Every structure is written in C-alpha cells, then in structure tokens.
Image (tube, rainbow, N blue to C red):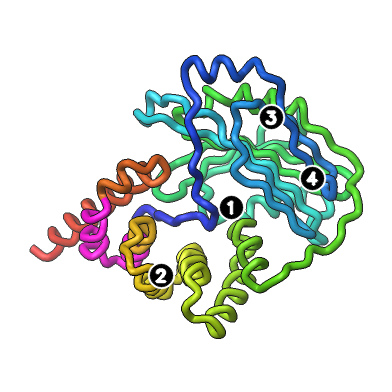
Amino acid sequence: MKARIIIAITILLGMVCLAGVQAQETTNLPPRQLSKAAFGIRVSYPMEWQVFRNFEDETDATMGFSLPKVMSEEELAEIENAVIVSAYKRPEIANLDQLMSFETARLRNIIVSSVNVAHEFGKAQQVVTRLKGLQYKSLNVFRFENGVGYVLTFTATPGTYDLNIDKFESFLKAVEFYAPEASQPREYQSRMQEAIALYQGGPRNAARVIELLEAELKENPGNPMAVKLLGITYFGTERFQDAIGLFDKAMELANAPLPRLQFYKANALYELDRYQEASDILKTIEEFCTNDKELGPQYLTLARNLDAAITRDKARQK
C-alpha cells in the first residue's frame, strides 16, 4: 500500500524557532492563559509556546500550541511538537464513552494503533497515526465536565515524544474547568467570511466550506481566495482531479507559479498515480520547498515516494 500524503486543511504555520539560550531564558517567565468561556475551560501555557490555532463556533472549540523545536536523534531533524485542546458541545457526545468513540472515528483515516492507558487526569489513550507519510505518537486525555467533552492531546514524532511528554503533563495540571457561559450564535458578514472561519476550524467543516466556496465561485469565478481555498479543501476530501484544476486556475489568476500550490498539485498527481508529472513539478520547486521549514520534511517524503513509485513502474515495464 502506498504511503498517503494528505495535506491537512489548516493554515500552514510560520513559527519562529526558540532554541539555546533564548529557550532557557523564556522558561522562567510566567505562563500565559487562554480561555473558552462558552466551553468552560481555561489553560495556562509557557511563554515559549506559540498559539497556532484558536477557533470557536457554537459546537466546537480548539486551542493549538506549538512547542519549541527539539533535535531528534531518531529522525535526524529538528521537530516541533504540538499540544491541542479540543472541546465539544454536541448532542451525540453526552458522556465520556461517546467522546472517546467520537475521537476514534475522527482519526479513523490516519490511525495506526490505539491503546488505553492509565492516567491521573482521566481516561487516556496512546495513539500512533500516520499522516503525509510520516508517523506520529500522541497521548489523548479525555474529560467530560458540565455537559462538555474535552480532548487534550500531545503529539510528537517517535523520536521526540519522550523529550516533551513531561511538559504536557505539567500543562495538564494547570487546566481549569468551570460552568460554561451562555454564548450567542455567531453571525457572519459575508459568505467568504463564514467559509474562511469554517476552513480554519479544520476538516470536520469541509462539506460546508465546499458548499459556500462553490456558491461564491458561481457568482465570482475570479475570486482568487475562493479558488485557492476550494482547491485545498477538495484536496483534503480526496477530490484530487478537481483540486488540480483549481490549483491551475489560482496560478493563472495570480499570473505566477505559486510554489506552495505547485507542491499541493504534485501531491494530488501522486495520489492519482501520475508519478512522473508529480516528479517533474517537484524538480521546479526543490529550492523553495527545502528552504521552507513546514514543507521541507513533506517534500523529502514525497520525493522518496515518487522515486520508489517511478522505479517500481519501470521494473514492471521490463
């Protein structure tokens, strides 16, 4: 089975690495706080952590934090681990067991293994996933308080998990739960504003995002943001041929090659078994990708998979 290289429907990060003396100095600073009053949760996090996701709607809320990069001897690279706090107020999540089932279903396309583990904070699972051809190790901790389900997750690579798990355990000790405050339904000023907000909320909103963006492009076919976001959303829902068409249209509208979209296009071609076309694109954006800390590891994984696929196809033709 060929490795999957699916780009998650999120805003790609551009974080500044804190290392060496800088990291040592910031660890002595007081923590910062982030709250979701409508979901009854407040977290405190170290100054050196960076917030990369802060989303909330009527039913779901997410807070995502990136930790300073650490060197992995196993992966031979600097790795940025993540802590994500998810909160759910959904009718289908009425107890802890339903919350755990919901999370398992949410990860079903990328999960490799899941094992229940004892944890003082609540029920927990150690989960191994594979995404974009890379393997990750996570600890998911579950709580159900005041009618709200919470999933607190630490995600790392196998080579960095033990380096940062203690920081996650310290983070958990400072989490506060309280009675949720009443919230008003969110109102959007435009179709695009709603689409962008839902897009930032992640893959669970894909169907609604597609509906909004397709409607937008019927009225405004030259809207470059709508074209780009719909292409990425199509990709995330495995509509690869549709995604390629929109990536090409976005680059046509911009009158520029847009190397990040070129990378997405190469991924889509790979998923369609059009290996040589994908490889040809990668060669044109090698310098951009290798100098991009987010795309670099993904580029190397895709390049290796393409080389293996092309070699395999040539062997079959002999």
Residue at position x 59%, y 35% in the image: 50
Residue that badge 1 annotates: 107
Residue 287: give x, y in percent of width and height.
26, 46
Question: In the rendered view, would you say 185 is above or below 95?
Answer: below
Category of crowding for the residue at label 3, using alpha-carbon neighbours closer than 10 angstroms: few (below 14), some (14–19), many (at least 20): many
Disc 3/disc 4 C-alpha distance (Å): 14 Å
Label 2 neighbourhood size at 10 Å, few (<14), some (14-19), many (20+)?
Answer: many
- Depth-wise, is mark 3 or mark 1 nearer the camera? 3
Q: How many marks?
A: 4
According to the picture, the residue beneath numbered tag 4 turns out to be 36
Locate the N terminus and report the quarter of the image it occupies.
bottom left
Residue positioned 62% across, 39% down in the render: 51
Q: Marks 1/4: CA distance?
A: 24 Å
Residue located beneath label 2 in the image: 250
Helix, strand or loop at mark 2: helix
- Horizontal relation, residue 165 to residue 129: left or right: right
Residue 81 shows in the view: yes
Pick the front one: 31 or 274: 31
Which amino acid, by three-letter code, is at mark 1?
Leu
Q: Tell me where the magenta segment starts and ends, as one range.
A: 266-285
Q: Residue at x 62, y 75 (%)?
A: 212
Specify the label residue 45 is tagged with: 3
Q: Quick check: is 14 in the magenta stretch?
A: no
- Circle 3: element type: strand
